[in-house]
Amino acid sequence: MLTLRDVHAHYGKSHVLHGVSIEIRAGEVVGLLGRNGVGKTTTLKAVMGLVRRTGGQIVFDGQDLAAVPTHQLAALGIAWVPEERRIFRLLTVLENLRTGLDRPGLAPARREELLERVFARFPILRERRHQAGGTLSGGEQQMLAIARAMVLEPKIILLDEPTEGLMPRMVSQIREIVHALHRDGVAILLVEQNVPLTLEAADRVYIMEKGVVRHHGQAADLRANPAAIHEYLGV
Amino acid sequence: MDQLIVQTLHGLVTGMVLAMVASGLTLIFGIMDVVNFAHGDLMMLGAFTGATVLGVTGSFWLALLAAAIAIAVLGVLLQITTLRPLIGRDPLTTILATFGISLVIQKYALWQWGPSVRRITEPVPGHFTLFHLEYPWYRVATALLAGVIIAALWLFLKYGKYGIWIRATTQDRVMAQAMGIPVPLVHTAVFAIGSAMAAASGVLFGPFAGVTQTMGFDFTLRAFIVVVVGGMGNLGGSILASIFVSLVEAYAAIVVSPAQAVIVSFVVLVLTMLFRPTGLFVPTPK
Amino acid sequence: MTGERIPGAAAAGDGGMAAPLLRTEALTVHFGGLAALNRVSFAVPTGQIRGIIGPNGAGKSTLFNCLTGVLRPTGGRILFQGEDIAGLPPHVISRKAIARSYQITNILPGATVLENVRIAAQSRHHNWSMLRHHRSYGDIIASARAILADVGLSGKEDELAANLSHGEQRNLEIGIALATEPRLLCLDEPTAGMSVTETHVTVELIRRIARGLTILIVEHDMEVVMGLAHIVTVLNYGEVLAEGTPAEIQANPKVQEVYLKT
């Protein structure tokens, strides 16, 4: 469904992706692991058209994304939950959700349904729905960021380090959310540094180093034999 | 004492018109980092257009509407042709571009309407006696109308669906795009709104002192001061600052001549930049 | 890559023999309620290459910022050559012979490669005289050229810095830091964004320049750090988690846990 073929990307002069090839099929949870600075977030940004692509191809549902501007990706079915969450701090929780709910073509009934669904999954958001996004705690902001992606009814969610900076209790909540999304048939490209969570939640895992994919395998295989994990993520 | 009340009235009325001009300016800056040097000229062009329509139709309100729409359309064309291609370039480029647009508009107005002063007659005639003055009702009406327009803008931004799009884009353009908000369109729309408000304020201000090519200049100058004092991109701040600065100037005019009173506005600007550079009416940044 | 060590450099456990060049005592930095650094104490003997690693948010950048005067610590001391430099502004610290290379390159793009280094070298011998001694100017050019040779940019002297490749620019950055004749060189992720080839070039560069120098290097690339450093300090959540030779660190289960479970 989403295929990256030999993708190169630059930040100014810095050649950050040196030919990344990744594939995510419909409904799959794919993990992307790697140390800091290897290009995991850049890979997501390349899909979102937020970084200068200097080579390779990105294809989604048969469509080359090279010519698609960022603001049209949501309609295609790609949602992004960035590393810093990027909640609209001065908008309320409800208004944050509305940035996704107010999209053209969505019937009011369906809007209400989506809103209810998201509030049911994240009751704390219902409670805080009139509160400004910037006043939420880190964990709540993460939930809002994920909820915001969910209301787009995406085919795939690009989830960038959702557990970063969260307490252990919240981390298990994230795990549950990933499972639930998986059950709903949403594909997820999960960038993480939390190895156990990724190995448990993902079907397949890619490991990156210095701008390329160095290892690719079934999560189950990596759980059984974590040599590659130690090599590319350990000390 | 009477002077104080009279000047307060002056200050409030001018402040409201200034607020209309400054709102557009600060919105445009807040959302796309464009310092619109042509803003005052859009006001002037609006006033001339209004005067012309008034001459043809005899209706002030029609003139107001027509001017707002015409200049909004012009704003859209300018934004699409000149500013959109410059997005992402260094800010000096857009400053130069809007400065160039400003020059073109001024000369065009001179060519189109000639150097003589146009008149816009007040739609609300009559005066009331305020102490020793005959104070035109129209000025009060202007302040009220400006207030209504600004309030409408505020409500639109706060509660309207597209208002949320505008606010989201202002706060985080990239994330807004990721949410599917058509950011290029939002930019154009905001420029249109800003232009329309500038034009409308031009028509409203027309009866005060006549319509000339240079009428925009004073307002542009003060609008920039007000946008900085109120906090760049901060709509509420620029409105409060407009009233504040206009009042301060009006009071200063009791002591010195009005032409010299503008100095206090600059003093306010300098003090703001020294002590509260993010804006007087903005909560202190943490 | 665990190859050559610099002859004469202090090895692990040798910190008690001579006074360390750099020592921090209970260095603490609070950002609001968050402790970015919490009572960090470590010592680096002269001539050592010290690697600093740790997961995201561990405090590595904060530590560097304190050492180079960009950030004032909330508590603790930083003793450089016996003198407490905590809280001193960057230009004063630079005069005390601590230099730093940055993640975002600080080169002057509009100047040539030689000029970039020359300007940095001149700043070291700064004086207010408007008359420059012809001879001392020649000396400065000579030492700038020597530094360019060290960082492998001799052939590109007259090239505009903006035209260099990314890797070359980062190496120029190191050259600029060297030109200020530091005794302590702080390298902030020197191989970030580099290809494998460029990384190898930079590692060799660092080995070359390490003589007579004490180097602190923050890196995410484990091969680079483990191959270059004599001793590695591991930070986690603003505290020193472990310290030791690369082999010791790699065998340390606590460190593995931090990296694989975070």
Image (spheres, rainbow, N blue to C red):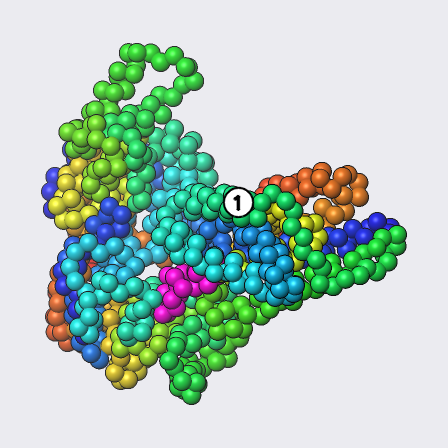
Q: Nearer the viewer, residue B210 or B3?
A: B210
Residue B170 part of the magenta segment: yes
Image quadrant where residue B80 sits? bottom left
Above or below residue A153? Residue A20 is: above
Residue with the mark numbered 1? B111
Q: Amino acid at mark 1?
A: Trp
Snapshot quadrant of residue B62: bottom right
* Percent position of residue C215, x then y: 26, 38
Q: Is residue C58 left or right of residue C171?
A: right
> Residue B227, how many percent across, how many down?
57, 51
A99 vs A235, nearest the viewer: A99
The residue positioned 42% from the left and 76% from the top of the image is A102
Q: Badge 1: few (under 14), some or many (20 or more) residues near its Cα, within 10 Å?
A: few
Vertical order, A133 against B48 (above or below):
below
Q: Residue at x 32, y 26 (%)?
A: C119
Residue C243 visible (yes or no) = no
Residue closest to the eye, C36 or B52: B52
Answer whether residue B271 is magenta in the image.
no
Q: Is residue B27 left or right of residue B90?
A: right
In magenta, the rendered stretch is: B169-191
At mark 1, the secondary structure is: helix
